[in-house]
Amino acid sequence: MSAKTWIPTPARPAPANTVGFVGWARENLFATKLDSALTLVCAALIIYLLDVVFGWAIVDASFSGEDRNACLKQVQGACWPFIDAKLGQFIYGRYPEMERWRVDWVFALGLIGLVPLLMPKVGFKRANVIFMLGFYPLFAFFMLTGGRFGLAPVDTSDWGGLLVTLVVAVTGIVGSLPLGILLALGRRSELPIVRALCVGFIEIFRGVPLITVLFMASVMLPLFLPDGVNFDKLMRCLIGVALFASAYMAEVVRGGLQAIPKGQYEAAAALGLGYWKTTRLIILPQALKLVIPGIVNTFIGLFKDTTLVLIVGLFDLLGIVQLHFTDSTWATPETHITGYAFAAFVFWVFCFAMSRYSIFMEKHLSTDPNQ
Amino acid sequence: MTDPVIRISDMNKWFGTFHVLRDINLQVAAGEKIVICGPSGSGKSTLIRCLNRLEQHQEGIIEVEGVSLDGSSKNLESIRSNVGMVFQQFNLFPHMSVLENCTLAPIWVKQKTKQEAEALARQFLERVRIPDQADKYPGQLSGGQQQRVAIARALCMNPDIMLFDEPTSALDPEMIKEVLDVMVELAEDGMTMLCVTHEMGFARQVADRVIFMDEGEIVEENEPEAFFSNPQNERTKMFLSQVLSH
Ligand SMILES: Nc1ncnc2c1ncn2[C@@H]1O[C@H](COP(=O)(O)OP(=O)(O)O)[C@@H](O)[C@H]1O
Ligand SMILES: [Mg+2]
């Protein structure tokens, strides 16, 4: 009896027109007549838009000059010298020029603390968190306000621009996440009073516009405080923004909590873990991971909402850019649009970075091989 | 009989107005293996979940190792760390590796150091025959492997009593055996076990007593041989003919 020996058929290379760039383009761009038409229309649109933007921002733009005369060409694009001349104002507001190094230090130290914190591979997370949540806020507070350690006091009404935007946004972000988590947990609590308080808080803050909250914080709050007690307008706005954002955050987090199967609670209970340990070790890590997109979405919304502090007399980045439109030295037809484009770009950079980071984190935290 | 480790007397439980457990009386001696069977909805899960108070009973007494389940949180803590439970749906923590699943409770409930807990976990993972999966996540394992991790996770607390709620019902047929083998070994090592299961082969092999429940009552209990060959109650006969016919 002779068994047949099986020899595997040798592999052949795939047809040339299905691999490489040509193959990719055939499959993705020109698979059908409709696909081809769409590809061409979109390509034309992209080229047209790039041409317009490129023409305005580079080709027809002015790049240097001391005043409006630099930006009065026949065909005038962006007026970049305006941004250049005002950049200090846009970043620091009316923070005294002599003292701006203090802001730089706060920015720099923030960056130094934040970058390793955001990179999962870098160790020392506990020390890093303590640094960022314990030391850094105190450092930033004393550096920025001054009046101690031989630093000249700088009133918060002189703060402005990107500084205010970042202070409001970062405080809002850092404050709203823990507060939102507590509110979400409270809303699911078995204690009726805790639940009622949390529901009341969330629904009230979600039910009014941020502008109202800011107005209340800056105009009405002092009425409730005893005479002589008065605290800073910026501080009041920070609290208002953080509370407002925490109400949204609470609902996002609650969505995550609801998605955790009952079995997880039961398994934790059966192992002898109590409420807080279960929440911290089992429930929140899973719930928060599920709602990273929603959390970051709230952060992004909050970041852009900081522009509303303008209405209570604080000048964030956008506010200060607009303020400088009235400067007659730079009165040209392109000043507005250049300023807005600049502000939009700065906001976009921050928000886009948050969005990309959120996608990165989602992938990094995924333990499900089927995703 | 020595002092029972579990003593349930005249226990009743309601879900709202629904009387789910009726006059339950049951004593389990140390090292005894009990298999509980009965039709779906008869209250088997509820009964064993009362033993570690995942459900609360309203009437009667449940004592586990002499400690009464009466709502005092100190008693509850001590009982839960001495009673392990394995669920039908495994309920592993998906965001933690297999090893972390097993070390979590020893570290956070029993205050063991990480090294101690990991050594213990590896020992039990060895015992359930998956020592090489320690660093994987539950989502990367087969159902049978996940259930064995769940058993190891419970064993890491060094429980005196193990509760199983249909541990093989969510498994593909070819994986049932690997889980049952682990359970048989555990039984041979003298663990006190209460298993809700319809694996009659397993019941025959390890059970000291089989309990049949219906409509929230213990209808019949007997040694496995007598239970299967000579059921006393009509209801039991009918149930057995259904379960054993396929
Ligand atoms: N949390 C609950 N609330 C209300 N009814 C429940 C609850 N859990 C179980 N039941 C009911 O109690 C009965 C017994 O359930 P269970 O103990 O899970 O049965 P078994 O495990 O024997 O299938 C069923 O009728 C079920 O619908
Ligand atoms: Mg059940």
Image: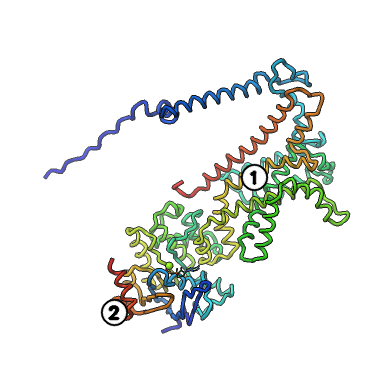
How crowded is the residue under tag 1: few (<14 C-alpha within 10 Å), some, or many (20+)? many
Separation (CA) of disc 2 from disc 1: 68 Å
Report the amino acid beneath label 2.
Answer: Asn
Report the amino acid beneath label 1.
Answer: Phe
User: Could you tell me which residue is drawn at 32 percent across and 70 percent down?
Assistant: B200
Residue nearest the viewer, comparing A349 with A201: A201
Residue nearest the viewer, comparing A335 with B107: A335
Residue A360 lies, with reference to residue A288, above or below; the image says above
> Quadrant holding ligand 2?
bottom left
Residue A27 lies, with reference to residue A368, above or below; the image says above
Q: Position of residue A248 (x, y in %)?
A: 65, 50
Name the element at disc 1: helix
- Pick the quarter of the image with the N terminus of chain B: bottom left
How crowded is the residue under tag 2: few (<14 C-alpha within 10 Å), some, or many (20+)? few
Which chain hosts label 1?
Answer: A
Q: Position of residue B184 (x, y in %)?
A: 35, 68
Picture quadrant of residue B142: bottom left
* Label 2 CB less than 8 angstroms from ligand 1: no
Residue nearest the viewer, comparing B164 with B108: B164
**Left/right of residue B223 with respect to residue A109 in the rendered view:** left
**Residue A20 visible in the snapshot:** no
Which chain hosts label 2?
Answer: B
Question: In this view, which residue lies farthest toward the right?
Answer: A228
- Pick the quarter of the image with the C terminus of chain B: bottom left
Q: Position of residue A115 (x, y in %)?
A: 63, 41
Q: Which mark is residue B230?
A: 2
Q: Which mark is residue A226?
A: none
**Mark 1 lies on residue:** A299
Name the element at disc 2: loop
User: Could you tell me which residue is drawn at 37 percent across and 64 percent down?
Assistant: B182
Picture quadrant of residue B211: bottom left
**Left/right of residue B32 with respect to residue A305 in the rendered view:** left
